[in-house]
Amino acid sequence: MSQTGYILAITRGHNAGACLLKDGKIVFAIEEERLSRKKYDGGPYASMVKVLDYTKKIDMLLIAHTQGLYETAGKVDFSGDDVYTGMARKLGLIEQQTIPGQPHPQVIDLSIMHHKLHAGCAFYRSGFDSAVAVIVDGAGTFFPLDSQWGPITGFEVESIIKCSYPYNLHTLYKHLGTREAPDFTHSQMEFDDPLVGPEMVDTIITDRAGIVKVYEAVTEYCGFSAIEAGKTMGLFPYGKPNDNIPKLFETYGEHSLASRNVVIPTYPNSAKVNFRLHPELQFNYTIHDQQHEDVTKLNNRRDLAYALQTQTQDEVVKLIRKAVDISGETNVVISGGYGLNCVANYEYLDQLAGEGINIYVEPVSNDAGTSIGAALMFYHYISGSTEKSTADIYLGPQYNYTDDDIQSLADCYDAEVTDATNKDVVDLIADRNIVSVFQGRCENGPRALGNRSILYDPTDPDGKDFVNSVKHREYFRPFAGTILKEDVHEWFDLRGMEETPHMMYAVNCQPGIQEKIPSIIHEDHTCRIQTVTEEQNPNYYNLIKAFKEKTGIPIVFNTSFNLGGEPLVETLEDALRTLSNSDIEYCYLPEYGKMLTIKNLDETP
């Protein structure tokens, strides 16, 4: 690795966070919500403070978002700094500004390249020498445009970017959505890359919603927040094909675009289902309060969720094929918000089988990944390095608790501390107790992969309903599983993949498997599965191996260590607080050989 010093990249918007690099290696990366305890939190202030645990000075601050930094972030009183330059200065991470009112020489705003930051995160962690990135996002960078109606704003929704080392990221295609644009325009447009200058890009501009905006519109229609698209993904298997549901996409020449008769974009916010034009979709808005009826049990919600999932994933397949065709690349990396759609990711493997296309899906595809992308891109740009990074996911801060620390925290929550082994934990799980696991560095992205996980017995027929009730989640939300890598093909169809260590695919179970592990098999006979090896996570691997030795099942029921509506736990105190606010009694600390237990106060002696 080249000696480039400390590079700090931050993401400002929802799913804010930070990534700290030292000489090209990630020191830590974290989402703001893990520290602030507010889901999807913006403004990475706590993340910036966390940097002080690792260094008191940085060489460069990179700022990622979807708009220009100095226009939207606000100013620090008196000094006039933008708030993030001011924060870094006040923390002592960068030098005092010598020329008031001028951009700070240690700060670079990369907000006008939001989709490239997604692409950089995926490409540099993919292991490919070269690739084409397919970015499918809600609303990326905001671009001012001129039109016959005067100035309007275009919002990045889909991009195709050709990538190679050290820093050759060239945008080949971009789809901009607007509120006011003409029905459809197609032209070459110039876009700036702050690091290398302008590039001409094949661009379409429409007044129609992008793929993710369609997903957000239906998500809101189903009664959720637009950003909770994962809930709609969980609901879709309860629906079925319904000819009365209008088509969500229409063909315009060689382009397939959202139907404005069905989905109305409200950029930069989400979009709305135009249900008044379609009798099958009409409903009384008072149902949304869910006091009288759960709207997710209505067929028009379920069937629309089904149409949404199947049609949007088909649209992304078209985009992947387009990317391969115009780039000449057969290695494809996928990122942006839609990259977290594990149902669609598995569908690509089926629809693209036999076409010679290799796919890598970035596990930190949400906006938190843009800080990782910014840091890695800038490092390769200034160093010229062609050394590949790995898709490590355990990138959170390291916590080193002493026995006294553990006991002190336990005392605060009236928890009992006892010695424990994998055998003790396996016995608890086999007796159908929920056991949480807290170890090492937290996972990046939304998936719990054994360091901040809740474990249960996958063979319990009532396990899904039981754990959903304990976590305060909706009935239709599926659960994941973690399996020893060497056993995965006997239990699941990976469609040609050797492993799935980041839990980015909802895969079919093999015949006869659903009856063996019913609590983690969803309505459509799939499971969002994680494979694990001893090298990837030795404590977690050995725990599952012990479970297999006792039960013959090489899989544990795995879900994120949090309650509904909360971020994953970050610290041991977060873990204990979660236990104290729930019916979860056990938290296993495998690194310390300890078990923390908080008995349910309602339990009869």
Image: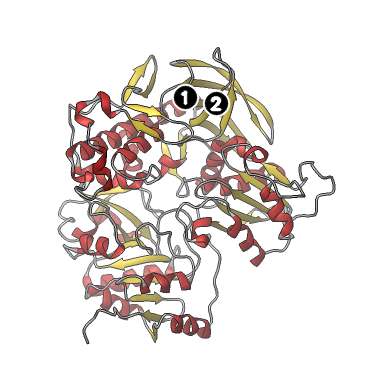
Nearer to me, 529 or 146:
146
Query: What's the image's color scheme?
Result: secondary structure
- 89 on left or right of 398: right
- 95 on left or right of 271: right
Depicted 36 relative to depicted 377: above or below: below
- Name the quarter where the C terminus is drawn: bottom left
- 445 on left or right of 48: left
Which amino acid, by three-letter code, is at mark 1? Arg
Q: Position of residue 220 (x, y in %)?
A: 34, 40
Quick one: label 2, few (<14), some, or many (20+) residues within 10 Å? some
Q: Residue at x 72, y 63 (%)?
A: 56
Which amino acid, by three-letter code, is at mark 2? Thr
Task: Tell me the number on the disc at residue 179.
Answer: 1
Q: Secondary structure at mark 1?
A: loop
Which residue is farthest right?
Answer: 98
- 100 on left or right of 364: right
Q: Quadrant of residue 113?
A: top right
Q: Position of residue 65 (x, y in %)?
A: 58, 42
